[in-house]
Amino acid sequence: MQRVAEDAIAVDPFDQMTKDHHYIYSNTGAVGIVDRPNQGALKDKLFASVRVTHDDATESDMHKLITAYTESAASPKECTGKGRQTARKGA
């Protein structure tokens, strides 16, 4: 996670890290691992990064945001693209 945070905007590798090492966050940004279901043979990890441009966010806000974002991105519909394929067929 610290290597990912080095390249992320508004996140420092030494910001708050969760005990499970899945998230690093500050009051300006956060990075997290997307735990993809049925990852199978995929060996590369998928990471998400978020940032804010206003001053009233807290570390807790950013932790909640990155957690919700990575969980949403890890949904089977998002990871497999099945939801997008269905939408295209009906369009």
Image (spheres, rainbow, N blue to C red):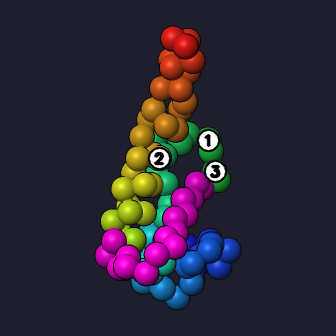
Span colored in magenta: 45-61
Q: Residue at x 39, y 71 (%)?
A: 62
Above or below, 74 against 89 in this view is below
Disc 3 is placed on an element classified as loop
Of badges 1 and 2, nearer the viewer stands 2
Q: Residue at x 52, y 69 (%)?
A: 51
Disc 2 is placed on an element classified as helix
Going by the image, does 67 lie left or right of 41?
A: left
Of residues 72 and 44, the one nearer the viewer is 72
Badge 1 amino acid? Ala
Badge 2 amino acid? Ala
Residue position marked by numbered label 3 in the rendering: 43
Question: Would you say residue 20 sits in the magenta stretch?
Answer: no
The answer to whether residue 24 is seen in the rendering is no
Number of marks in the rendered image? 3
The answer to whether residue 7 is seen in the rendering is yes
- Structural crowding at the residue carrying mark 1, measured as other residues with C-alpha within 10 Å and reported as few (<14), some (14–19) or many (≥20): few
Of badges 3 and 2, nearer the viewer stands 2
Q: CA distance from mark 3 to mark 1?
A: 6 Å
Q: CA distance from mark 3 to mark 2?
A: 17 Å
- Structural crowding at the residue carrying mark 3, measured as other residues with C-alpha within 10 Å and reported as few (<14), some (14–19) or many (≥20): few
Mark 3 and mark 1 in contact? Answer it, CB < 8 Å.
Answer: yes
Badge 3 amino acid? Lys
Above or below, 83 against 58 in this view is above
Q: Earlier in the sequence, mark 1 or mark 2?
A: 1
Residue position marked by numbered label 1 in the rendering: 41
Q: Residue at x 44, y 55 (%)?
A: 70
Q: CA distance from mark 1 to mark 2?
A: 19 Å
Q: Residue at x 62, y 74 (%)?
A: 9
